[in-house]
């Protein structure tokens, strides 16, 4: 459940937000806007401190109703010398509802447009990290939902500014204790500025113990003093070596091998950070491999124990939905339709017992009405994924490749890599140099395995998996099809606009260790058999198209890992420090994982805040290299 907030009548239209849990107001008697600007923004020397920087990272303890974020975003937006990229990382143990966040901002009309954008993304805030994206990817809010100390142990970056906020130390002592300050300090560099409104002696002593040098500064009457300072410990801080940020320095040149979802997402993420990216592909057009699927499903994975795959999938789905909303044409390129998951084998998928009402934003038990719409009996085991969609992958690939700073080059078959004085060279079969850069990213599916072998003695644990889908035009009046996609044992996307009209798309086959994309007639019959189990009523309507040979087919080769997690991480480094990364192994979840992996790669290269918990990022790196061959 979202945190309960009482609104006290103070004569204003919105009222004053009050927390029954802590017995305290969310805003000071001065008004939240003045506090945000004077205590936090000015207290950290902003906006002057970030002038003309490539990026700026702010850490906040206590997101509350988001006012500090909105004021900082507004200041960034108004500043002609603003940094190219603004990261705002905030912890919050008890997140408020999106409606209360918007109501709070109503007291400040200048912030309402920004608050409305924020409200639209404040859904499904389960424990863990949530990356929210604004300003075409130039303002990134990472909400860390949970205890501040635990959440900061899962984050890894060096903040430029720190806002210490929250209810008073007397009301909420946990967020003001020395252990929290030490967790904050681990995310600081020497010289990071810190600001807060409280001058309590315990707070000052705790900050000093954690390595901060603080001083009282005049406040706005009737508040006499605030607290400002910087991280400047008398000792040399020790940073954990495991999974430390891998900083490339300033953005440079990068070659991405592969123009599918993985490669295009990496190229777009780096180009947004001012990299010059060359994307090479053996085919004559982008998305010619598995990413050329006519339409695919973007669906979160669910498991009773909320496994690593489930948590990764939610992070990926959120990011891809943001990209689809920003870049694609609804109804033509994609549809935020929701997806029904029908469990045809066994008792069906179950939701984690710990999930509360907020989880319904993601997944819940399918309603009787939804089952009826699919022609399924009331006893059918099914989940409804509200934050799910169908997407044409090729449209997303091409949208990403239009990002300024990207050059795409087809008919460029990379055969191997070799180290050079100023980076890595990409060679073709004839030994000619196709390209050279200080960073090379292998994102060409199963072909990444052979390329990786030219620079690493340990093979990538990748497995090719062939998949074939069937499709047919049906017109808008086709009876018996559900109004939304259904997956489970196979899948059905009921209404996708193709060149000749509306079509249904069904599949897909799952053939391991096959690298041939040739069409197989038997696979079409297998797709029909899956449909007959998944959606018997709809399959009866569609069987005629199979029998009469009016079904088209498409096949592609996916690439998966033994643990079914994507792999992302560096696999080679030259004497000059130039790196080779692998970003692949996404299986049938390329739409889910491509953008997430790309943003994580960019975060690692630039020392930015992680878009997901550290242990999830580590899981993908640990999946990178396995002994032996699949």
Image (spheres, grey):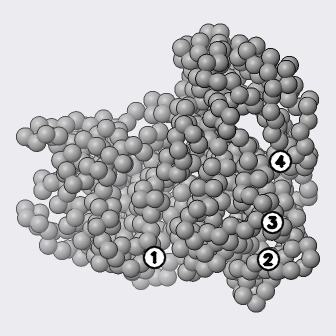
In this rendering, is residue 216 above or below 598? below
| Sequence-first tag of 3 and 2 | 3
Label 3 element class: loop
Which of labels 2 and 1 is toward the front? 2
Tell me the distance, in whole angstroms, between the alpha carbons under discs 2 and 1: 30 Å
In this rendering, is residue 163 above or below 119? below
Q: Are marks 1 and 3 in contact (CB under 8 Å)?
A: no
Task: Say which of 142 and 548 sits in front.
Answer: 548
Label 2 element class: strand
Give the residue displayed 80% in from the left and 68% down from the top: 412
Q: On the rendered image, what quadrant is the N terminus found in?
A: top left
| Sequence-first tag of 1 and 3 | 1
In this rendering, is residue 576 above or below 109? below
Tell me the distance, in whole angstroms, between the alpha carbons under discs 1 and 3: 35 Å
Tell me the distance, in whole angstroms, between the alpha carbons under discs 2 and 4: 25 Å
Label 1 environment density (alpha carbons within 10 Å; few <14, some 14–19, many ≥20): some
Q: Is residue 538 visible?
A: yes
Count how many numbered circles sit on residues in the image. 4
Numbered tag placed on residue 387 in the rendering: none
Q: Could you tell me residue 20's position as x and y percent?
A: 25, 37
Label 4 element class: strand
Residue that mark 2 sits on: 434
Residue that mark 1 sits on: 54
Task: Say which of 262 and 232 sits in front.
Answer: 262
| Sequence-first tag of 2 and 1 | 1
Residue that mark 4 sits on: 557
Residue that mark 3 sits on: 411
Spot the residue most to the bottom: 421
Tell me the distance, in whole angstroms, between the alpha carbons under discs 3 and 4: 19 Å
Q: Are marks 2 and 4 in contact (CB under 8 Å)?
A: no
Q: Is residue 573 visible?
A: no
| Sequence-first tag of 3 and 4 | 3
């Amino acid at each position: 459940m979202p945190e309960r907030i009482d609104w006290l009548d103070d004569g204003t239209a919105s009222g004053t937000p009050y927390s029954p849990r802590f017995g305290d107001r969310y805003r000071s008697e001065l008004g939240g806007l003045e506090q945000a600007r004077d205590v936090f923004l000015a207290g950290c020397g902003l906006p002057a401190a970030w002038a003309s920087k490539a990026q700026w990272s702010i850490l906040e303890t206590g997101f509350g109703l988001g006012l500090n974020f909105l004021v900082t975003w507004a200041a960034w937006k108004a500043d002609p010398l603003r940094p190219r990229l603004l990261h705002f990382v905030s912890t919050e143990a008890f997140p408020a509802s999106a409606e209360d966040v918007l109501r709070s901002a109503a007291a400040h009309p200048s912030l309402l447009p920004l608050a409305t954008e924020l409200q639209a993304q404040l859904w499904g805030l389960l424990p863990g990290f949530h990356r929210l994206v604004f300003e075409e990817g130039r303002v990134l809010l990472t909400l860390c939902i949970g205890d501040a100390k635990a959440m900061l142990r899962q984050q890894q970056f060096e903040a430029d500014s720190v806002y210490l906020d929250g209810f008073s130390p007397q009301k909420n002592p946990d967020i003001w204790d020395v252990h929290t300050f030490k967790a904050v300090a681990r995310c600081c560099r020497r010289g990071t500025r810190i600001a807060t409104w409280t001058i309590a002696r315990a707070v000052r002593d705790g900050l000093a113990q954690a390595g901060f040098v603080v001083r009282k500064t005049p406040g706005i009457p009737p508040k006499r003093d605030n607290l400002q300072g910087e991280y400047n410990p008398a000792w040399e801080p020790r940073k954990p070596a495991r999974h430390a940020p891998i900083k490339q320095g300033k953005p440079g040149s990068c070659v991405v091998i592969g123009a599918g979802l993985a490669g295009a997402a990496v190229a777009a993420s780096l180009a947004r950070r001012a990299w010059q990216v060359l994307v090479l592909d053996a085919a004559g057009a982008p998305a010619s491999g598995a990413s050329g699927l006519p339409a695919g499903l973007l669906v979160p994975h669910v498991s009773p124990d909320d496994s690593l795959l489930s948590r990764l999938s939610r992070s990926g789905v959120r990011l891809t939905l943001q990209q689809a909303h920003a870049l694609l044409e609804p109804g033509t390129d994609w549809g935020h339709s929701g997806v029904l998951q029908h469990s045809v084998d066994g008792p069906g998928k179950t939701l984690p017992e710990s999930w509360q009402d907020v989880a319904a934003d993601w997944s819940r038990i399918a309603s009787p009405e939804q089952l009826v719409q699919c022609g399924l009996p009331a006893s059918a085991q099914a989940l409804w994924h509200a934050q799910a969609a169908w997407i044409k992958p090729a449209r997303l690939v091409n949208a990403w490749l239009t990002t300024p700073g990207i050059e795409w080059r087809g008919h460029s078959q990379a055969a191997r890599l070799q180290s050079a004085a100023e980076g890595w060279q990409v060679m073709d079969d004839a030994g000619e140099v196709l390209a050279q850069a200080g960073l090379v990213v292998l994102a060409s599916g199963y072909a990444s395995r052979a390329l990786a072998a030219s620079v690493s003695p340990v093979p990538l644990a990748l497995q090719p998996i062939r998949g074939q889908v069937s499709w047919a035009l049906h017109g808008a009046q086709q009876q018996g099809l559900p109004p939304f996609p259904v997956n489970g044992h196979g899948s059905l996307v009921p209404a996708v606009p193709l060149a000749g009209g509306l079509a249904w798309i069904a599949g897909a086959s799952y053939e391991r260790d096959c690298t041939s994309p040739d069409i197989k007639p038997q696979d079409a019959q297998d797709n029909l058999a899956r449909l007959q189990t998944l959606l018997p009523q709809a399959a009866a309507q569609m069987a005629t198209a199979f029998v009469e040979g009016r079904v088209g087919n498409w096949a592609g080769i996916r690439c998966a890992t033994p643990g079914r997690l994507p792999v992302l991480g560096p696999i080679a480094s030259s004497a000059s420090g130039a790196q080779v990364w692998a970003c692949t192994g996404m299986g049938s979840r390329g739409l889910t994982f491509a953008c997430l992996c790309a943003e994580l790669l960019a975060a690692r290269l630039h020392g930015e805040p992680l878009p997901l918990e550290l242990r999830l990022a580590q899981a993908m790196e640990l999946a990178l290299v396995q002994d032996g061959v699949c």
